[in-house]
Image (cartoon, rainbow, N blue to C red):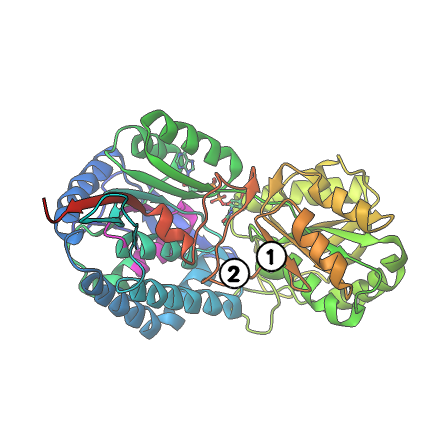
């Protein structure tokens, strides 16, 4: 498969620089070719999106919703094929990848329904004969910049609410999820979207990012990715006074209190930390254990992790696949080296069970490092979790909040009052009791505090607030 851009309803292959795409589960296997875009492709997309906005924004919400229902049906019809392509491109284990595509289908249906749902409010006027109301209007053209770790669901949770609110979109996916993005575009093209409503431009963030943020006439930007990139996206948008949201990194903690049922929680800790090879923004990367729970918890964790199978992404019996790319492999391996040299490994799984060379990293949990250590403070984004021991519940909360990030956090306990205190006191946008740090449902607000977010929320009803502006209307009907 070869990448191409979808602009104004046309498929265009950029003529410049190319790169071969290799399967991270077996790097000798070539799965396609990327053709990188330049500024000219973004300018063409700008024109197409702007022209399309005039008509798209005037359709009724119900009519826009019909397109989203058709997109959902098309995606569902191609779910397995798309999941296999994505697993081969960025290494997510196939069972999880199928689940992600299903989430995409659900998101499209959820936002399709918004076309005929809540759309503003009537506000009592202090004057007589006046009808005063607030309604949502579209923003215009929205730039959507997405990461590779949820190559299907994240783009959809941005452009489904953007489209239903009447915006048109220029989408720049992460270059290591380019083929998946192109296939999604092809699938959505079969839903008959009017030309220019959704435009896909494939390329490197380092090349297209500056142009998109500084030269393209955008009305808003929705970005998900690292905190470092997010900071520069936010600064550029603030300088232009356009609306932006930046969903960024995490260093999510799971707190285990001594009264938790160890047998029941271990699968949730292992899943939170190691599904998707730890490459979820909401992955559990810090495990904070109350001192009295340390022995029983770590014994059961060791036993559980020893059973975890690392395998090729398309192996349905594998628990996790490889990390996504050579760059990811280098970064995560660097953290693993530090962990082996400076920390104590307390649980780890077997080496990958595969033929051929791939970017496999075996999950491990380490302890014995200070709260300020890089393994406790920096986002690893791989299958490595740091365990800290807390004297008691109060210290566990302190440790949980001792980070610049604030995306997700969990507590495992059977004490209801401690559960409530945790929900109040943990500085994170998504706080969960007796559930893993990952896995917030699509109909609920998603986002972080502190350096995990620019304080907007995605998904659920909250996304509609980002992708629309409120217009206050007032009419005096009898003079
Ligand atoms: P990244 O920041 O490297 O890239 C994200 C996107 O930004 C890509 O499309 C990339 O091409 C683009 N980009 C790169 N440089 C740019 C620039 N100068 N201007 C504009 N765009 C640019 O992140 P990544 O490695 O793709 O993703 C991993 C990161 O994403 C992790 O930090 C993870 O925590 C975060 N993430 C956050 C959430 C969330 O909702 N908070 C969800 C998933 C991933």
Q: Which residue is mark 1?
A: 277
Q: Quadrant of residue 440?
A: bottom right
- Horizontally, is 189 left or right of 444 in the view? left
Q: Which label's residue is closer to the chain start, 1 or 2?
A: 2
Which residue lies at the image location 36% right of the left edge and 31% below the top edge? 237
- Horizontally, is 281 left or right of 294 in the view? left
Q: Are marks 1 and 2 in contact (CB under 8 Å)?
A: yes
Q: Is residue 329 magenta?
A: no
Q: Establish if 306 lies above or below 394.
A: below
Q: Secondary structure at mark 1?
A: helix
Q: Quadrant of residue 479?
A: top left
Q: Position of residue 42 (x, y in %)?
A: 24, 38
Outermost residue toward the left? 479
Magenta residues, as a range? 165-184
Quick check: can you spot residue 190?
Answer: no
Quadrant for the N terminus in the image:
bottom left
Instruction: Give whichever of 218, 80 is nearer the camera.
Output: 218
Which residue lies at the image location 22% right of the left edge and 47% below the top edge? 13
Residue neighbourhood size for the residue with mark 2, other residues' Cα within 10 Å, grouped as few (<14), some (14–19), many (≥20): many
Queried on whether the Cβ of the residue with tag 2 lies below 8 angstroms from ligand 1, the answer reads no
Instruction: Give whichever of 128, 46 is nearer the camera.
Output: 128
* Residue 213 disc label: none
Q: Establish if 229 lies above or below 157.
A: above
Queried on whether the Cβ of the residue with tag 1 lies below 8 angstroms from ligand 1, the answer reads no
Q: Which residue is mark 2?
A: 92
Residue neighbourhood size for the residue with mark 1, other residues' Cα within 10 Å, grouped as few (<14), some (14–19), many (≥20): many
Q: Position of residue 318 (x, y in %)?
A: 60, 69
Which residue lies at the image location 52% right of the left edge and 67% below the top edge? 96
Q: CA distance from mark 1 to mark 2?
A: 8 Å
């Amino acid at each position: 498969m070869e990448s191409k851009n979808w602009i104004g309803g046309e498929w265009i292959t950029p003529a410049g620089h190319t790169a071969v795409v290799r399967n991270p589960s077996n790097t000798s296997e070539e799965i396609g070719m990327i053709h990188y875009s330049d500024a000219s492709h973004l300018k063409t997309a700008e024109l197409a999106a702007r022209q399309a906005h005039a008509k798209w924004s005037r359709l009724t919400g119900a009519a826009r919703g019909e397109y989203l229902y058709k997109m959902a049906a098309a995606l569902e019809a191609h779910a397995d094929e798309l999941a296999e392509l994505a697993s081969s491109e960025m290494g997510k284990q196939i069972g999880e990848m199928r689940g992600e595509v299903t989430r995409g289908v659900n998101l499209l249906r959820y936002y399709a329904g918004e076309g005929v749902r809540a759309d503003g409010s009537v506000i009592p006027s202090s004057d007589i004969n006046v009808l005063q109301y607030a309604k949502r209007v579209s923003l215009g053209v929205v730039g959507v910049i997405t990461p590779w770790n949820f190559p299907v669901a994240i783009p959809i949770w941005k452009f489904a609410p953007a489209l239903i609110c009447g915006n048109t979109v220029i989408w720049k996916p992460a270059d290591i999820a380019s083929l998946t993005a192109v296939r999604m575009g092809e699938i959505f093209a079969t839903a008959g979207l009017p030309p220019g409503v959704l435009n896909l431009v494939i390329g490197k963030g380092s090349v297209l990012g500056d142009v998109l943020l500084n030269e393209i006439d955008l009305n808003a930007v929705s970005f998900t990715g690292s905190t470092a990139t997010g900071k520069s996206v936010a600064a550029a948008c603030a300088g232009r006074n356009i609306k932006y949201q930046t969903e960024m990194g995490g260093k999510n903690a799971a707190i285990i209190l001594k009264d938790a049922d160890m047998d029941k929680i271990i699968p949730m800790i292992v899943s939170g930390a190691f599904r998707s090879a730890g490459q979820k923004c909401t992955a559990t990367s810090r495990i904070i254990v109350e001192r009295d729970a340390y022995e029983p918890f770590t014994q059961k964790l060791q036993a559980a992790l020893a059973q975890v199978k690392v395998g090729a992404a398309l192996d349905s019996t594998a628990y996790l696949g490889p990390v996504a790319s050579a760059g990811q492999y280098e970064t995560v391996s660097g953290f693993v080296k530090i962990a082996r040299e400076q920390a104590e490994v307390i649980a780890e799984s077997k080496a990958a069970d595969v033929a051929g060379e791939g970017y496999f990293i075996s999950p491990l949990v380490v302890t014995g490092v200070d709260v300020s250590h890089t393994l406790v403070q920096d986002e690893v984004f791989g299958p490595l979790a740091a365990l800290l021991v807390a004297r008691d519940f109060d210290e566990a909360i302190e440790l949980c909040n001792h980070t610049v990030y604030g995306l997700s956090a969990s507590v495992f306990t059977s004490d209801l009052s401690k559960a409530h205190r945790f929900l109040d006191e943990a500085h994170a946008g998504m706080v969960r009791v007796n559930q893993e740090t990952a896995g917030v449902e699509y109909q609920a607000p998603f986002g972080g505090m502190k350096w995990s977010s620019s304080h907007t929320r995605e998904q659920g009803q909250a996304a509609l607030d980002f992708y629309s502006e409120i217009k206050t209307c007032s009419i005096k009907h009898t003079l």
